[in-house]
Image (tube, helix red, strand yellow):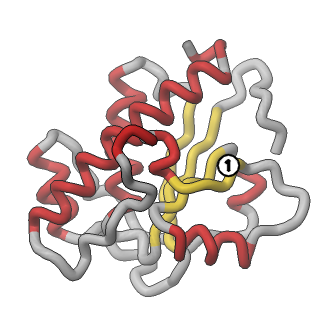
Amino acid sequence: MNNELKNNEKLCVLFVCMGNICRSPTAQGVFERLVEQHALSDRLIIDSAGTHAYHVGNPPDPRAQTAALRRGIDLSGQRARRVTPEDFFNFHFILAMDRDNLADLREIEPEGHGSRLSLFLEFAPGLGYSEVPDPYYGGDSGFERVLDLIQAASEGLLSHIRKDHPGLA
């Protein structure tokens, strides 16, 4: 995939965690809302997926949904799916929540794709964190912390996208 957008081409962003029920659907929801607030929904395609198939077809974790709803973000329409090799050709950005999932992505990464594969928190360097922690085995406060980290990285990502693609500014 060429990183230069052609006329009316949509920029495609994929968020990835392990099971696609906590962090990546939260990132999808937060980024969708931010993009909507900037009136760019018609210019971006946003999705999420997991590196493992544990929860394929399931909605996001109820705790993730509850935490997101407290901030006005509805995740209920999302369903977990697994990353496919085709995703590397269909998405401009594939953003892993942690190093383990980044390593898993690199194992299935086909040659010749044009996706930018990186850690999501690279777009929020001022936070002092490189990974979004998995809140699955923790309490409700973990989901709130994940939302805070994702919000900051989403703002950084959108700023980066608008800088690199002036047509979206």
Residue 51: x %, y % from top left = 55, 76
Residue positioned 61% across, 54% down in the render: 118
Residue 113, image quadrant: bottom right
44 and 165: which one is in front? 165
Q: Is 71 left or right of 159, judged from the image as shown?
A: left
Residue 99: x %, y % from top left = 53, 69
- Residue that sits furthest to the right in the current view: 112
CA neighbours of label 1 inside 10 A, class few (<14), some (14 to 19), many (20+): many
13 and 43: which one is in front? 13
Q: Is 26 left or right of 5, judged from the image as shown?
A: left
Q: Is 27 left or right of 8, judged from the image as shown?
A: left
Residue 10: x %, y % from top left = 65, 32
Residue 1, image quadrant: top right
The residue that disc 1 covers is: 91
Please state which amino acid type lies under the numbered disc 1.
Answer: Phe
**Where 2 falls versus 60 (above or below)?**
above
Residue positioned 75% across, 27% down in the render: 5
Residue 89, image quadrant: bottom right
The quadrant of the picture occupied by the C terminus is top right
Residue 87: x %, y % from top left = 69, 60
